[in-house]
Structure formats: C-alpha cells, structure tokens
Amino acid sequence: MKRVVGIAVVALATAGPVATAQQPKDTGADAATFDTAPWREQEAKLPAYPKDERLIRFDTGPTSELRFFIDRDSLSVGEDLVRFTLVAKSDGATNVSYEGIRCSMRERKVYAYGRPDGTWREARDPQWLRIGPPVTDLHRFVLWSDYFCPKRAPIRSANEGLDALKLGRHPEAADSALPDYPIAR
C-alpha cells in the first residue's frame, strides 16, 4: 500500500509543473490589465520632527476651530500613496502625526504620533481606514479631495503637493468632491 501512495505523490508532484507550463502567458501590451497582485505598501520611514518654520497651513473651512498644517519636508509620494506630517493647532495645544493617504481607496493611516519632546511614538497597529465624511474627518477629507488626490489619483510629486498647498487647492481638484456626503445642518 505504501508503494501505491508513493507513486501517487510522485505523479501529482510532476503533474503540477507540466500543467503550469502548458498555460498560455499573456505578454501583450494589456498584460498589466490582468495583473491581480495585491497592492503592497512600501515601508514608511519616519521623517525628522517638524519645525514651525517649515509648516504650510491648509484651509478646512470656517467651521474648524483648529488650524492645520503640513510639514513641507515630510511630504512624499509613492504608488497611490501620499505621506506627510500633519500638525493640528488650537489655542494652547498642538497635535502632530505622521500619516498617509491612499488616494484610489480614499483611505488613511497614522504611522506615528508626535511627543512634546520632539520625538515620534510609532502607532501600535497602523491600519488603513476609510476617510470619513467631512463632518467627522474634515481635515483628511480636504487633504484627499482638494490637495493630494485630485481626480482620486495621487499627486505626481511632493512639489506638486506643495504648490497645491500654497495655492489653497490643487488645480485639478474636482469641485464636486464635497457632494459625496450631505453636510448635517
């Protein structure tokens, strides 16, 4: 009986490569269209801690009690991904985080939080989360829709993002980004 099982295992082991070798391989121009490999994020490296003189303010509208800034030195662009240091200030408090936005999926991730001593504390279990509606996640929604992901695609370079921040909006940002969510009155 052991000999029969052994022959069956050898037969199965050799049949796999033969069957695979006979499958046609698409090498045409549209081969990328059929690529089903999952998206893989490149490793995030924490930037230097932000300095006030390197911050660029962005507007989230008249209802926000916080002032939001992006550290110009931390802005980076990858495949479908924009990373940056976000600084939120109010009277008497400052919050700092290193974050990413995945443009096509309208997702965000926090990689690390800033400490008062100017160091980073890495997030315990960073996960991609959906960017919420403007009433609950306004600053991230504005970064996604108006600055870093025009037409749901990432900016092409950090300089493009810095220009958008300086202009107050990316030139290709859709005017209809906000109607995705009704704003409660």
Image (cartoon, grey):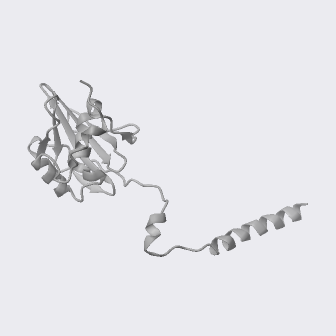
Q: 8 or 147: nearer the eye? A: 147
Q: Residue furthest left?
A: 53
Q: Return the x and y of residue 136 as percentages of the image width and height.
A: 29, 30
Left or right of 133, for residue 21: right
Instruction: Using the image as rendered, state which of residue 174 and residue 23 is in the foreground.
Output: 174
| Residue 111 visible at all | yes
- Seen in the picture, residue 155 relative to 28 is either above or below; the reply is above
Q: How many numbered callouts? A: 0
Q: Is residue 167 left or right of 3 when viewed as pictured? A: left
x, y percent for residue 21: 63, 74
Picture quadrant where residue 133 is located: top left
* In the image, residue 47 above or below residue 64: below
* Residue 120 in view of the camera: no
- Give me the residue at 12% from left, 43% from top: 55
Examine the image and state in which quarter residue 119 appears.
Answer: top left
Residue 74 in the image, given as x and y percentages of width and height: 21, 49
Residue 11, quarter of picture:
bottom right
Tell me which residue sits at (27%, 26%) in the image. Answer: 184
Question: Is residue 3 placed above or below 80 in the rendered structure?
Answer: below
- Please identify the quadrant where the C terminus is shown: top left
Residue 135: % across, % down: 27, 30
Q: Residue furthest right?
A: 1
Q: 44 or 48, which lies in front?
A: 44
Which quadrant: the N terminus? bottom right
